[in-house]
Amino acid sequence: MPTLAGPRREELAEALALAAAEARAYLDGLDDRPARGAAVDAATRSFRAPLPEHGVGAAAALRELVARGLDGTVASAGPRCFHFVIGGATPAALAADWLTAALDQMAYAWVSSPLGVEIERLALDWLKELFALPPAWGGVTTTGATMANFVGLAAARQWWGERHGFDPSERGMGGAPPLPVLTGGHVHGSALKCVAMLGIGRRQVRRYTRNAAGDLDLGALERALRGLGGAPAVVLATVGEPNAGACDPVAEMAELAERHGAWLHVDGAFGLFARLSPRTAHLAAGVERAQSLCVDGHKWLNVPYDCGFAFVAEPALMGRAFRYTGEYLPDPDDPRPNLGTLGPESSRRARGLMVWATLRAYGRSGHRAMIERHLALAQRLARRVDEAPDLERLAEVPLCVVCFRYAPPGMPEAALDGLNRRLGGALLEDGRFYAGTTTYAGNTALRPAIVNWRTREEDVDAFVEVVRELGARLAADR
């Protein structure tokens, strides 16, 4: 085998042609591909080797990756992936993402990529239109909802510190009074992670719930805000919690936040898309009254990983929270946009290109149609669960998540959690579908989420049959 000194221009054409051909073959078979192959462990172990002294070249490395690597993947882009609220990638978004990698733009500031920055700003403006948000809000793309939550809560922390007479981005949180974060039981772990990263502390999060499902106790929230005596606080609402798709009453929370001078942050990672359909828009009513919110792109928008969006009603707070300078960097007062100073990332991929492409390709009506088709598929799944004598639905289905468990007649209640935990493991090992378990209102349950543009009625129907088949086998073994 010849020794290669490094990358060569003449490799490029063969490498790109090979990648395109293999990607096309993979996508052509995606509808029927198992969600997870049986050889996952062997495939991933096969790559463990010392760093080679001499390379094999681009084409040979790619052939090796395809030959051994595809068995180690999860078909998360396919129609039978119902785990983690993973969206697919529309044709327009996928192709634009390939171009983004080829163009290799650094969308930090206008001077580093005029196209990347301007397209991202336009895409954010279009998203504000799509979600019916105030046009004056500021925004920035992020790696996902976690960092979008981070941006919104960093802006909230900045606001809170300035209300107390200091700049937390300069002085830090040492010696400051506790920053209260008031929320319900639907708060997502990513928001708590951000509270920790921002130095606010998880212990400052106070949950007010009225039942085991975690629904917000509005009366308790109001009493807590009143008890602060007008001191600034953050109220955190969730639109679309991941176990059953439940939504906090954002409009009522906004009313309380306004009355008591609090900051309202909305985590709408996938639930914000409820605003696209008349049948679900009421679930996200009031988000336009928030001070900040987050949403994912790689969930219900169906753009490739990774992509999220943060929106803040007072954009200047983002600049004060994330500002930084350097001798070689653009002047902070440069009138041309500098997106790297509005969020945590300075080295920023030009994610706006794939967002713009899918919005340009399908428009408002196309994305509304996709959302409504997923809503209908979730209701179909719920009906199939309700009709099955050995399945039990545990929650209403307001959006695209169906929370249920396998509960055969005569099985003691005490045995159901263990049975459903084993069922979750069996589903992953079986590989025909990709779905996992959760704990909902104290019960172990499945919580498939339908957010992929490829998913069909036959996929939903087959999923129910696979769950019943595996559940019956496990129950019989018991």
Image (spheres, grey):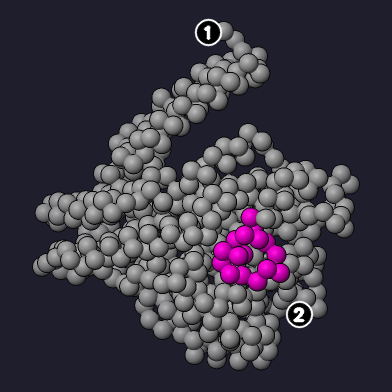
Residue 10: image tag? none
Q: Which residues are magenta?
A: 123-139
Residue 422 visible in image:
no
- Which residue is drawn at the image coordinates 68% and 50% (left, top)? 119
Residue 137 in picture, x, y percent from top left: 69, 68
Total numbered circles: 2
Res 240 → quadrant: bottom left
CB under 8 Å between callouts 2 and 1? no
Return the residue nearer the eye: 36 or 105.
105
- Which residue is drawn at the image coordinates 69% and 55% (left, top)? 121
Residue 390 in picture, x, y percent from top left: 16, 63
Disc 1 marks a residue whose amino acid type is Met
Return the residue nearer the eye: 162 or 259.
259
Disc 2 marks a residue whose amino acid type is Arg
Q: Which residue is mark 2?
A: 163
Q: Earlier in the sequence, mark 2 or mark 1?
A: 1
- Which residue is drawn at the image coordinates 59% and 15% (left, top)? 54
Q: Residues within 10 Å of mark 2 (few under 14, many from 20)?
A: few
Q: Which residue is mark 1?
A: 1
- Which residue is drawn at the image coordinates 29% and 43% (left, top)? 431
In 3D space, how far apart are the residues under numbered discs 2 and 1 (Cα atoms)?
A: 67 Å
* 137 magenta-colored: yes
Residue 277 visible in image:
yes
Return the residue nearer the eye: 18 or 236.
18
Res 279 → quadrant: bottom left
Residue 26 in picture, x, y percent from top left: 40, 33
Residue 144 in picture, x, y percent from top left: 56, 55
Mark 2: secondary structure = helix
Q: Quadrant of the C terminus?
A: bottom left
Q: Is residue 260 above or below residue 412?
A: below
Q: Is 438 situated left or right of 1 in this image?
A: left
